[in-house]
Amino acid sequence: VQLQASGGGLVQSGDSLRLSCAASGRTFSSYVMGWFRQAPGKEREFVATISRKGSSVRYAMSVRGRFTISRDNAKNTVYLQMNSLKPEDTAVYYCAADRSEALITTQLSNYDYWGQGTQVTVSS
């Protein structure tokens, strides 16, 4: 599967953004999907994950209550709605797909396919 992330940009603290990740192929619904981010000089970190049918989700503590992950299997797309953005949310955001049998997964190493990343910059 090929993943194409979009929707990043430059916003002010407190603003919102919605990231999208479009997947190629007809097997999108068979993948657990996740969002990760990587700030300059830091390791890539888990943000959110969603199960194949969207019934289970999990978030990093740092974004819980502000970010919402969702998916539309008919459109082969996963979304990340980001509200109340903070300067510390500044990073390149990556979507990823996991083809394993896991319900959801927060482990970066479990993901098999990665998008190219989209830059999110939050100014104070």
Image (spheres, helix red, strand yellow):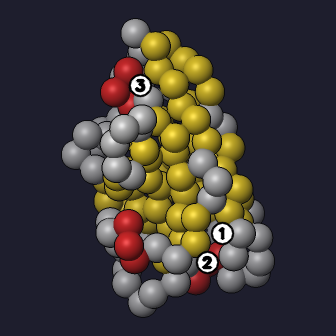
Q: Label 2: state its secondary structure.
A: helix
Q: Residue at x 76, y 81 (%)?
A: 26
> For the residues marked 2 and 3, what is the alpha-carbon distance in whole angstroms?
29 Å
Q: Are marks 2 and 3 in contact (CB under 8 Å)?
A: no
Q: Which residue is mark 1?
A: 73
Question: Badge 3 local density, few (<14 within 10 Å), some, or many (20+)?
Answer: many
Which residue appears farthest toward the front when viewing the image? Answer: 41
On the rendered image, what quadrant is the N terminus found in? bottom right
Q: Label 1: state its secondary structure.
A: loop
Of mark 1 and mark 2, the one earlier in the sequence is: 2
Residue type, mark 2 in image: Ser
**Measured along the vertical axis of the image, is residue 49 above or below residue 99?**
above
Residue type, mark 1 in image: Asn
Return the x and y of residue 106 as percentages of the image width and height.
32, 66
Q: Label 3: state its secondary structure.
A: loop
Question: Badge 2 local density, few (<14 within 10 Å), some, or many (20+)?
Answer: some
Which residue appears farthest toward the right when viewing the image? Answer: 25
Of mark 2 and mark 3, the one earlier in the sequence is: 2
Q: Are marks 1 and 2 in contact (CB under 8 Å)?
A: yes
Residue 74 visible from this viewpoint: no
Residue type, mark 3 in image: Leu
State how many labels appear: 3
Of mark 3 and mark 1, the one earlier in the sequence is: 1
Residue 69 visible from this viewpoint: yes
Q: Which residue is mark 3?
A: 85
